[in-house]
Amino acid sequence: MEIKIPELSLVLLIGVSSSGKSTFAKQHFKKTEVLSSDNCRAMIADNAVDQSVTKEAFSVLHFIAAKRLAIGKLTVIDATNVQSKARRSLLRLAKKYHVTTLAIVFNLPEKLCQTRKQQRPDRNFGLEIIQKQHYDLQYSLRNLKHEGFKQITILNSIAKIDKSEIKLIPLACNMRDVTGPFDIIGDIHGCFDELLILLQKLGYQTQFSNSKYTVIHPQGRKVIFLGDLVDRGPKIPQVLQLIMDMVTTGNAFCIKGNHDIKLLRTLKGHDTKLIHGLAESIQQLQTTSVNFHNQVIEFISNLSEHYVFDAGKLVVAHAGLPEELQGRNTGKVFEFALYGKVIGRDETGLPIRYNWAADYKGLAMVVYGHTPVLNSQWINNTICIDTGCVFGGKLTALRYPEKELVTTTAKQIYYKSAKTFF
């Protein structure tokens, strides 16, 4: 049985004493990844089963777990975890550090655990402890799926435990091994003509044949698109086709933007308001085939909300991303990466967003878009390159690692905003 675990997550081993949790942990995880309540007791009292220091032991366990999660390390908790109170504190810890929590439950018969316990001279507590733990476990199994675990695996026999294999799954955002060089392009919003001009300025060679685009840079550079490919502009299907072809052939990366997500929901049949340029997308896509619609659905569905490149030196997210959310994969990361943090509304009704860049102290360069600016400027190693092409501004690219900005001016104002940007 293969158990897939995200490379960054908090894993709770759940089961009564003598159910095989510690043996399983030793077999499948690095020693440094496993935090054992027994080991914490031993560190404090020189005795792994000294129940008088349980509170202190779990204080140590939580402290180390927090430090590991803060720097993005897989953490496995080897404790009974049969009571909801114990699990809640660990779930809160995972939420604080924006990582998912998984449970692996060792649901063996009580009698088997009692027998095993009697064969372990280092476990000198009474059999009634096993009985109480088993009762708590069976009670917990009724509600475990409602507690906030991303994944729950229940192992009901020794055979299942012995046949289990752990497979670590890289997070979708993890592109640390991809080092570039890149050309990062801001919000396009259907401005296809300007995109072609910008690609040419950047040195890319574009060909179109058999209904497919081939876009190649002679020096092997790749493009990163920052999302918001659609809405408002005049040639949305063409933009989608070109970028989908570039991503498919490995010549580009793309992250999703909030406009892309809304189009996806509409194409999937959800009830959405045709505002903020969505009507233009739907109208233009009506001239394309159902097959093309399905390709767009699959494409947007598979996009990540952010990427971490070049050993963590470069982070791209549509609306930017503070350091504590980078390389994580929770709902809060998704929301911030796509929308930012809204703290109010201006006189035109447009959102006022928290200026996270002003407080940024992270080591990674963060390149983003989402909110149009007149000119791109560096703020604390972050830069917004949405320069409002669809509103009559410019389409901007940032060369990485050179930090060189390349722009092309919009041919016209394609969409009038409630707020004057340019």
Image: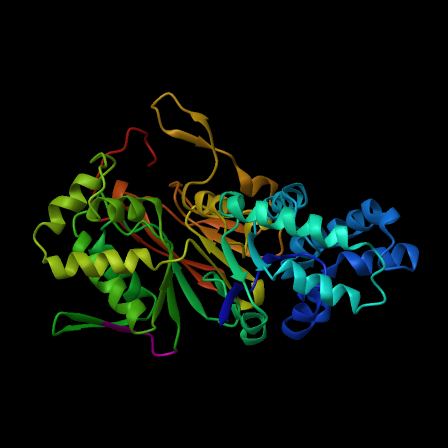
Q: Please tell me which residue lies in front, 352 or 174.
A: 174
- Which residue is depicted at the point 64% across and 48% down? 135
The percent position of residue 17, horizontal first and vertical second, equals 72, 59
Q: Is residue 217 magenta?
A: yes
The answer, for residue 3, to whether it is visible in the render is yes
Name the image quarter holding the C terminus. Answer: top left
Please, is residue 2 above or below residue 45 in the view? Answer: below
Can you tell which quarter of the image residue 312 is in? bottom right
Q: Please tell me which residue lies in front, 11 or 9.
A: 11
Q: Please tell me which residue lies in front, 135 or 262.
A: 135
The outermost residue toward the top is: 347
Q: Is residue 378 left or right of residue 205?
A: right
- Which residue is depicted at the point 9% across and 58% down? 289
Q: Is residue 49 magenta?
A: no
- Which residue is depicted at the point 34% across and 60% down? 302
The percent position of residue 373, horizontal first and vertical second, equals 40, 41
Q: Which residues are magenta?
A: 214-219
Q: Is residue 274 left or right of residue 134?
A: left
The answer, for residue 380, to whether it is visible in the render is no
Please, is residue 10 above or below residue 86 in the view? Answer: below
Q: How is the image coloured?
A: rainbow
Please, is residue 248 above or below residue 54 in the view? Answer: below
The percent position of residue 282, horizontal first and vertical second, equals 15, 45
- Which residue is depicted at the point 11% across and 57% down? 290
The percent position of residue 100, horizontal first and vertical second, equals 54, 52
The outermost residue toward the right is: 46
Q: Is residue 35 left or right of residue 347?
A: right
Q: How many marks?
A: 0
Q: Is residue 27 left or right of residue 418?
A: right
